[in-house]
Image (cartoon, coloured by chain):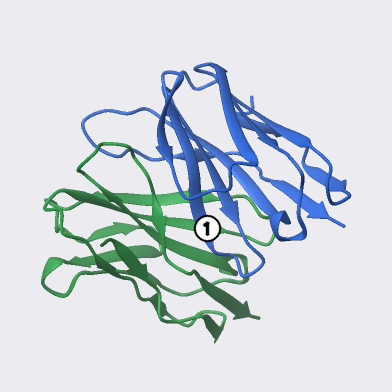
Chain colours: A green, B blue
Amino acid sequence: AQKVTQAQTEISVVEKEDVTLDCVYETRDTTYYLFWYKQPPSGELVFLIRRNSFDEQNEISGRYSWNFQKSTSSFNFTITASQVVDSAVYFCALSEGSGNTGKLIFGQGTTLQVKP
Amino acid sequence: DTAVSQTPKYLVTQMGNDKSIKCEQNLGHDTMYWYKQDSKKFLKIMFSYNNKELIINETVPNRFSPKSPDKAHLNLHINSLELGDSAVYFCASSQMTSGAMQQFFGPGTRLTVL
């Protein structure tokens, strides 16, 4: 059965600290896709990254970086030098390749609070 | 230019009423979705349509009925509203290719049932 676990419910850091949000997934598919979305206090869902199961290269985008490790079924997200504007709920999500429906299975979300 | 729009943004209604939420996307995508976000922020898929055909129907009460008049629209009708239906409902769209692509989400509709 497919499942996404974000064990950290809430994280609080002070501005400029680095922070890592954990994501662990379960799937029986060999082809699957992993996503991160951000939900700021205004409520919209903002796409951050998509990664397919065959691409284990880590990715960096500005202050954001992602570490995909199939061996541990993890897709962790690090924010370097956090800023107050990073305060949001962050969701990790999984979409399985079989069935090709694009259905997203979300983790519970991690609420990140960055204090000035 | 709004990519995925939903109306209304807020909906407050009494138990037992019937209500609809509309969704439109102007991205030319062939697949649209409805997700429900509960009070604990948990997001769960409800329905999905691909080229106007239902492809995902999760274990949702049959009081919820999606309708897709064309590829650009996916509406959600809810009959006999219950207190537990209070949530934020998100519409999303994507282009189905050989793999799951990024989904673009609408701004959400906050439904409050009194």
- Three-letter amino acid code of the residue under disc 1: Leu
Picture coordinates of residue A113, whole percent (x, y): 60, 78
The residue lying at 65 percent from left, 31 percent from top is B5
Q: Is residue A17 above or below residue A91?
A: below
The residue lying at 38 percent from left, 40 percent from top is B102
Asked whether residue A34 is in view, the answer is: yes
Q: What element does badge 1 sit on?
A: strand
Along the horizontal axis of the image, is A53 left or right of A7?
Answer: left
Outermost residue toward the top in this view:
B70
Picture coordinates of residue B73, whole percent (x, y): 58, 21
Q: Residues within 10 Å of mark 1 (few under 14, many from 20)?
A: many
Which quadrant would the N terminus of chain A be assigned to in this image?
bottom left
Which quadrant would the C terminus of chain A be assigned to in this image?
bottom right
Q: Nearer the viewer, residue B19 or A43?
A: B19
Q: Mark 1 belongs to which subunit?
A: B
Q: Is residue A25 above or below residue A33?
A: below
Residue B109: image quadrant is top right
The residue lying at 49 percent from left, 69 percent from top is A109
Q: Which residue is mark 1?
A: B43
Q: Nearer the viewer, residue B20 or A102?
A: B20
Along the horizontal axis of the image, is B7 left or right of A60?
Answer: right
Picture coordinates of residue B55, whole percent (x, y): 38, 32
Along the horizontal axis of the image, is A97 left or right of A46?
Answer: left
